[in-house]
Amino acid sequence: MTTVTVRWFAAAAEAAGAAQTVAHAPDGASAASVLASLTEGNERLGRIVASSSLLADGSALTDRDERLTATTLDVLPAFAGG
């Protein structure tokens, strides 16, 4: 079992109702599966996450289906105005 701290920013934090969430995922889980479990039942958060950039331990995560080895996952929604 892996523990991942998901930090929500801006609209994602508002939709999640928290600045961060601690998730427990099976070893070898992907960012996509961790986020899917956290957004289940929250359609608004799911839409925001789908269009957000992700950082895994501070580095850009480009493949959400890749095995997640990070302990911190940042969800950064698109920001208007650059």
Image (tube, rainbow, N blue to C red):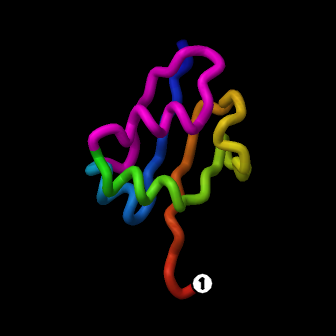
Relative vertical location of residue 39 with respect to residue 82 in this rendering, above or below:
above
Q: Residue at x 50, y 21 (%)?
A: 25
Query: For this view, does 23 lie left or right of residue 55?
Result: left
Quadrant that contains the C terminus = bottom right
The amino acid type of the residue labelled 1 equals Gly
The residue lying furthest to the bottom in this view is 81
The quarter of the picture where residue 2 lies is top right
User: Vertically, is 79 above or below 65?
Assistant: below
Q: Residue furthest top?
A: 1
Q: Which residue is mark 1?
A: 82
Observer-nearest residue: 33 or 21?
33
Measured from the top left, where is residue 58 in percent x and y?
Answer: 68, 48
- x, y percentage for residue 15? 30, 56
Res 14 quadrant in image: bottom left
Residue range highlighted in magenta = 18-41
> Is residue 15 depicted above or below 4 in this figure?
below
| Magenta highlight on residue 64 | no
* SS at badge 1: loop
Q: In front here: 42 or 58? A: 42
Residue nearer the viewer, 16 or 29:
29
Residue displayed at 71% across by 44% down: 63
In the image, is residue 12 above or below residue 82? above
